[in-house]
């Protein structure tokens, strides 16, 4: 799971937060004393390198930018060896440049690791650019389920229960 507000332990280092992704695979004692195998440590550093965070490995998480924190969250989730990644508004708190970096990483993870990423997004333009499939939900009901290129303005307005001209995505 990748969270909107990162859910990192700020006083711990990046590498410690990433290794915490393995806690579900540890005994209570192993987790409490912070025992990690050499292979787990190597894997953590490989993931950090893939996400461009090698130089931040020993920094405290409270010293990082929002985009860096989100990449630490992604690394932590990858340490769990998931079959599926759930992303709750992974770019909601980020500037447009950091948002692109995060979405590019998630797209790369999807392609290179063959991991399904399900993202809850409110940025329609981002969903249209990155998604292979969009599911639009209104009042708990699915009102659209299909490819991005078939999601038209009328359906977007139905999803957001809005009139023409009320959304930032409206042109003109």
Image (spheres, rainbow, N blue to C red):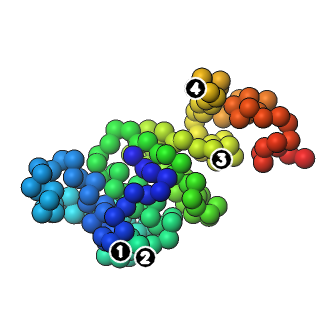
- One can see residue 18 in this view: yes
Task: Tell me if mark 1 has few (under 14), some (14-19) or many (20+) residues whose alpha carbon lies within 10 angstroms of its own.
Answer: some
Q: Secondary structure at mark 3?
A: loop
- One can see residue 107 in this view: no
Q: Are marks 1 and 2 in contact (CB under 8 Å)?
A: yes
Q: Residue 22 at x, y = what percent? A: 23, 53
Name which residue lies at 31% across and 76% down. 58
Q: Are marks 4 and 3 in contact (CB under 8 Å)?
A: no
| Vertical placement of residue 157 versus 95, above or below | above
Q: Marks 2 and 3, Cα distance to the nearest angstrom? A: 27 Å
Q: Earlier in the sequence, mark 2 or mark 3?
A: 2
Left or right: residue 133 versus residue 128 is left
Q: Residue 156 at x, y = what percent? A: 73, 34
Q: Earlier in the sequence, mark 1 or mark 3?
A: 1
The answer to which quarter of the image holds residue 163 is: top right
Q: What mark, if any, has residue 140 been given in the picture? A: 4
Q: Secondary structure at mark 1?
A: loop
The residue singled out by tag 1 in the image is 60
The residue singled out by tag 2 in the image is 63
The answer to which quarter of the image holds residue 135 is: top right
Towards the viewer: 170 or 128? 170
Task: Tell me if mark 3 has few (under 14), some (14-19) or many (20+) residues whose alpha carbon lies within 10 angstroms of its own.
Answer: few
Q: Marks 1 and 2, Cα distance to the nearest angstrom? A: 6 Å
The residue singled out by tag 3 in the image is 123
Q: Residue 118 at x, y = what percent? A: 48, 39
Towards the viewer: 107 or 25? 25
Q: Are marks 4 and 1 in contact (CB under 8 Å)?
A: no
Name which residue lies at 26% across and 58% down. 20
């Amino acid at each position: 799971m990748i969270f909107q507000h990162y859910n990192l332990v700020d006083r711990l280092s990046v590498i410690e937060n990433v290794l915490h992704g393995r806690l579900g695979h540890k005994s209570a004692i192993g987790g409490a004393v912070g025992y990690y195998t050499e292979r787990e440590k190597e894997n953590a550093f490989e993931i950090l390198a893939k996400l461009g965070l090698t130089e931040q490995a020993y920094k405290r998480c409270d010293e990082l930018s929002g985009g860096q924190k989100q990449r630490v969250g992604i690394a932590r989730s990858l340490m769990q060896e998931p079959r599926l990644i759930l992303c709750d508004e992974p770019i909601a708190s980020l500037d447009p440049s950091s948002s692109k970096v995060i979405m590019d990483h998630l797209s790369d993870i999807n392609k290179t690791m063959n991991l399904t990423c399900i993202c809850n997004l409110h940025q329609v333009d981002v969903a249209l650019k990155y998604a292979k499939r969009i599911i639009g939900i209104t009042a708990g009901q699915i009102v659209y389920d299909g490819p991005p290129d078939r999601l038209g303005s009328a359906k977007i307005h139905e999803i957001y229960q809005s009139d023409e001209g009320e959304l930032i995505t409206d042109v003109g």
